[in-house]
Amino acid sequence: MSKYWSAIVSGLTPYVPGEQPKLPNLIKLNTNENPYGPSPRVLQALAGELGDTLRLYPDPNADRLKQAIAAYHAESGITAGQVFVGNGSDEVLAHVFMALLKHEQPILFPDITYSFYPVYCGLYGVEHVTVPLDDSFEIRVDDYFRPNGGILFPNPNAPTGCLLTMKEIERLLLGSADSVVVIDEAYVDFGGESAIALVDRHPNLLVVQTLSKSRSLAGLRVGFAVGHVDLIEALERVKNSFNSYPLDRLAIAGAVAAYEDVEYFEKFRQAVIVSRDALTSDLQTLGFQVLPSAANFLFARHLRKDAGQLAADLRARSIIVRHFRLPRIDQFLRISVGTEEQCRTLVDALREILG
Ligand SMILES: *Cc1c(COP(=O)(O)O)cnc(C)c1O
């Protein structure tokens, strides 16, 4: 606290990201990064940008990237003009709060969800009401049919990994025509179906995705949103009142290359899905209850051992998982799916810890 701080800053409760410890030989299963590296074509594209042109500003509209994203989702009929890009989907979401979610009524999101949402509410002065997940930790669409200033949730949800069906999403969209519905699809490539397919039929739908997880580019910071041109224009207005160049030359080139290497993407997302399913049954054998996951992480609780203690015991063996000391989920661990070898090391460690 300092007398130089603005009143807004004094009242902020910032997001606390999963730690990035600088220890060697750590098995890092705490922030849902992809255990596999990015496509070699991405690395090649990045190398190609290292040169004299770095003295020039990048394309403020990142048109090449918007076209690559629209082309990848061509079946949905979207055009580059329906794509908004930003410095990670966190930045895209921040602009969404300012551009589309700040209204008279409070916005709605689940009680158990991405913990950045309430932080943006604090930063932008957006009122919110949390809607409890049901006893199986699923989103119940009917609970969102009430006056609101917008609806927001990840699908699959985080940190549960649970997926809401397209049919339920469409029911929510039809019953919420006066509100923007924002679906944060950070993990959709690991087992969900993208709601981008619904964008053309629903002017109130905005879908947000990131290249951080399924495309192994958390370090490059690229995210995007797809929706009706009117929603995209609102985001562009905020972006161009904030930072005209959110994506640098490397980010644009790397992201375009990631979309061009479809084969690499398919191969490694499949590898993660196979490891996730194997890890699920291994954890169940060890006495864990594991929520059904469509993501690259598992949300699991052990029926006898305290979650905080388990996380500490794993840490002592250089394995880091995420434990949230929050109501309803303080006995769960969120475990990112690692390589086959990392998963094996994790299961061996747990077997030892649990005796
Ligand atoms: C990881 C994550 C993001 C942020 O992704 P970036 O593009 O790296 O900023 C957004 N939403 C959810 C639910 C996430 O898990």
Image: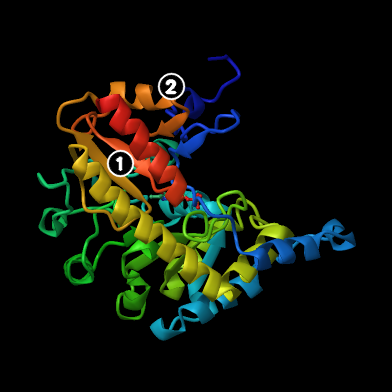
- Who's the residue at 50% across and 27% down the image? 9
Is residue 74 positioned above or below 47 on the image?
Answer: below
Please tell me the numbered disc located at residue 316: 2
What x and y, as percent, mark residue 73?
45, 78
| Left-right relation of 318 to 350 | right
Mark in the foreground, 2 or 1: 2
* Scheme of image coloration: rainbow
In front: 300, or 274? Answer: 274
- Who's the residue at 58% across and 55% down the image? 37
Q: Examine the image and state in which quarter residue 239 appears.
A: bottom right
Q: How many marks?
A: 2
Is residue 220 positioned above or below 192 on the image?
Answer: above
| Residue 60 in view in this figure | no
In front: 346, or 40? Answer: 346
What x and y, as percent, mark residue 181?
30, 61
Is residue 7 positioned above or below 143 on the image?
Answer: above
Q: Amino acid at mark 1?
A: Glu
| Left-right relation of 54 to 12 | right
Q: Amino acid at mark 2?
A: Ala
Is residue 337 positioned above or below 249 on the image?
Answer: above
Question: What residue sits right under mark 1 in the picture?
Answer: 127
In front: 274, or 233? Answer: 274
- Who's the residue at 15% across and 27% down the image? 304
| Left-right relation of 260 to 348 | right
Please tell me the numbered disc located at residue 228: none
Crowding at dot 1, Cα within 10 Å, few <14 / some 14-19 / many 20+, comes out as: some
Quarter of the image with the C terminus in it: top left
Instruction: Kindly report the distance in space between the C-alpha atoms of the residues bearing marks 2 and 1.
Output: 41 Å
What x and y, as percent, mark residue 217?
57, 55
What x and y, as percent, mark residue 251?
66, 59
